[in-house]
Image: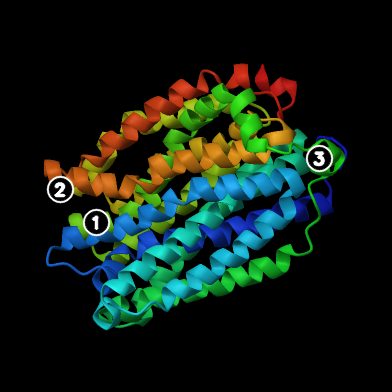
Amino acid sequence: MSPTDRIGAAGWRLVLLASLGGTLEFYDFVIFGIFARDIADAVFPSASPIASLMASFAAFAAGYLARPLGGIVLAHYGDRYGRRKVFIWSVFVMSGATLGMGLVPSYAQWGVAASALMVILRLVQGFCLGGELPGALTYVVEAAPRIAPLVCGIVFACVTMGVVAATGVSISVRTFLAPEMVPLYGWRIAFVLGGLGGVLSFWLRRSLEESPEFERMKSLVSRQPFTEMLRTHPVPIFVGSAILAGTACFNGLFFSHLPAYLSTVLKYDPREAVVSQTMGVLASALGILVAGWLGDRIPPRYLLRTGVGLLLVFAIPFYSALESRGMPLTPVLVVAGLCAGLTNGSFAVLLTDLFPTRIRFTGVALVFNVSFTLFSGMAPLAATSLIRDTGSPVSPAYLMMGAAVLALAGSLFSKRYGGNVLKPAAHA
């Protein structure tokens, strides 16, 4: 594809198919957090509801712990042999793991073996996701480098819509099943649907062609991309990890921790919590698209700074409003989603901009997975622990504030160490 400011119908087809996989992959991964309380009751039971929920979130975090390893392994093959095969097959294997999670026997049937099997399948999910989203981001910026902010925004907006799909399934399950049946079968239905959706994504993606930019330079590929990246780009690794801190922490708290937090800690009606969160996620997806569009006109680093600045300032008021119920739940979550859209819609292009084509997949995968493991995967467990130790339902706000400060700091170096994808005007 020629480097023009516009791409044709075939180019948009590539972008949308790459994005579709992200939608289904994130559905698979986030559905665990949405049904965390029900999974805790079925697979990780305990006399204490908080302890049971913490065990469930520990399993959730285990999936993130596998992501850096999966990213390193899969990105190695992506930088050596091509992007296409990696993120086609990663969605297929992850879908099998998701399907298996829906069929795991209960603790009452298998005891500790059921808990162990759920953790193992969660690890497989995380391993595959370690290559999926970095592969999709790498693919689309190489397919459309002149409008990289927009196509990255489209990918992450579609990823966010995977959360909407997950919450939509949750609403349907809680609407059509009797309340006592949801902990038994509702979460299983959600996992099975996610697994089948992943198989569909695999089938659709088979028609994708290789990244044009990779095709042009594949005779010059690195034999050891991970080693080369560590040797030649150590500073961008730290810069990228800091830039992603705000996005990752927000996603871990808002997408995965919030449903169980609202229903278990603050005693909101579970269905009300899910409906309101869905509205917030839709607002976030809209904000991401707007940020992607603006990123072709305003340097993305400015958009990211604005977004994390808003998260820093409003973190405590947000959690205070949830605790006091002084405002309707839906408007509070919608405003939070819109604020985060600026951050979620700008971080991806800044990340891909840090690394050249030769090692881009590896660099994006390492930074993305390390950041999301530390700041997103651990966020629900850390937030729940803070609430338990401090007795304050507002305490998760401090996690968000710390991550926002890191992202602001990282953005200060993005211009100096970037410049591999964005056109020069975007760095002015």
User: Which amino acid does the dot numbered 2 rest on?
Assistant: Arg
> Which label belongs to residue 388?
2
User: In which image quadrant can residue 382 be found?
Assistant: top left
Look at the picture and state if 34 lies above or below 311: below
The numbered mark, 3 or 1, whose residue comes first in the sequence reads 1
Crowding at label 1, few (<14), some or many (≥20) Cα neighbours within 10 Å? many
Find disc 1 in the rendering and name its residue: 54
Mark positioned earlier in the residue sequence (1 or 2)? 1
> Which quarter of the rendering shows the C terminus?
top right
Q: Nearer the viewer, residue 250 or 77?
A: 77
Q: CB atoms at circles 1 and 2 under 8 Å apart?
A: yes
Q: CA distance from mark 1 to mark 2?
A: 10 Å
Q: Nearer the viewer, residue 152 or 242?
A: 242
Position in image of residue 284 (x %, y %)? 48, 46
- SS at badge 1: helix
Closer to the observer: label 1 or label 2? 1
Q: For mark 3, what is the residue?
A: 213
Q: Is residue 327 above or below residue 20?
A: above
| Residue 234 point in image, percent of width and height | 56, 24
* Viewer-side residue, 70 vs 270: 70
Give the structural element (helix, strand or loop) at label 3: helix
Q: Is residue 180 left or right of residue 71?
A: left
416 shown above or below 95:
above
Q: Secondary structure at mark 2?
A: helix
In x, y percent, where is residue 204? 72, 67
The amino acid beneath tag 1 is Met
Residue beneath the point at 24% across and 60% down: 53
Q: Residue at x 31, y 77 (%)?
A: 182
Mark 3: which amino acid? Glu
Q: Residues within 10 Å of mark 3 (few under 14, many from 20)?
A: some
268 with respect to 17 (left or right): left
Q: CA distance from mark 2 to mark 3?
A: 50 Å
